[in-house]
């Protein structure tokens, strides 16, 4: 029989020492904070999605741009992002490859060389 169940069959928390209870409380607080942050991010994302759709609707009605134009543009952006993500810069000191988003080598702090053309959307 499981020690965590009382005679009535109800689940009971085992007796925990002070340190474990403190850790449990802190972990619960962090979990609650993360839940709040996720909810806020979901709200922002939903709002951003709504604004994006409204902007596209407006653009679609007031210009000659079509859904096909939008789809083609999305495809271009996906390709451009992939290309940017694959671009690596080489450290002059340790020769390690670094993401284009780094200003200095993430391994040794050395200078990076290579293709450095950055997109406005790399941040
Ligand atoms: Zn380096």
Image (cartoon, rainbow, N blue to C red):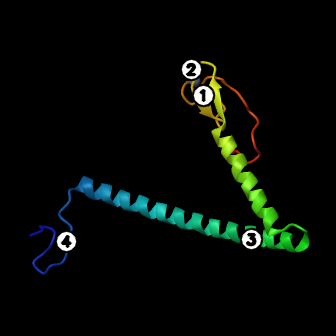
Q: Nearer the viewer, mark 4 or mark 2?
A: 2
SS at circle 1: loop
Mark 2 burial class by Cα count in 10 Å: few <14, some 14-19, many 20+? some
Which is nearer the N-term, disc 4 or disc 2? 4
Q: Residue at x 57, y 25 (%)?
A: 96
Any atom of ligand 1 within 8 Å of the CB at mark 1?
yes
Instruction: Between residue 52 and residue 28, name the one nearer to us.
Output: 52
Which is nearer the N-term, disc 3 or disc 4? 4
SS at circle 2: loop
Which residue carries the number 1 mark?
105
Rendered-image quadrant of the N terminus: bottom left
Numbered badge on residue 12: 4
Mark 1 burial class by Cα count in 10 Å: few <14, some 14-19, many 20+? many
Which residue carries the number 2 mark?
94
Looking at the picture, does residue 100 appear above or below residue 25?
above
- Ligand 1, image quadrant it occupies: top right
Residue 101, position as x, y percentages in the image: 66, 38
Q: Residue at x 54, y 67 (%)?
A: 39
C-alpha span from label 1 to label 3: 39 Å
SS at circle 3: helix
Mark 3 burial class by Cα count in 10 Å: few <14, some 14-19, many 20+? few
Looking at the picture, does residue 62 appear above or below residue 29?
below
Proximity of marks 1 and 2: CB atoms separated by less than 8 Å: yes
Which residue carries the number 3 mark?
53
SS at circle 4: loop
């Amino acid at each position: 029989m499981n020690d965590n169940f009382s005679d009535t069959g109800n689940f009971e928390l085992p007796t925990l020492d002070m340190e474990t209870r403190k850790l449990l409380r802190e972990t619960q607080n962090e979990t609650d904070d993360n839940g709040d942050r996720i909810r806020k991010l979901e709200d922002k994302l939903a709002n951003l999605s709504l604004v994006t759709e409204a902007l596209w609707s407006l653009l679609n009605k007031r210009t000659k741009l079509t859904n096909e134009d939008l789809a083609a543009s999305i495809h271009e952006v996906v390709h451009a992002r992939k290309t940017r993500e694959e671009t690596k810069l080489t450290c002059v000191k340790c020769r390690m490859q670094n993401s284009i988003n780094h200003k200095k080598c993430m391994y040794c702090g050395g200078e990076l060389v290579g293709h450095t053309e950055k997109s406005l959307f790399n941040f």
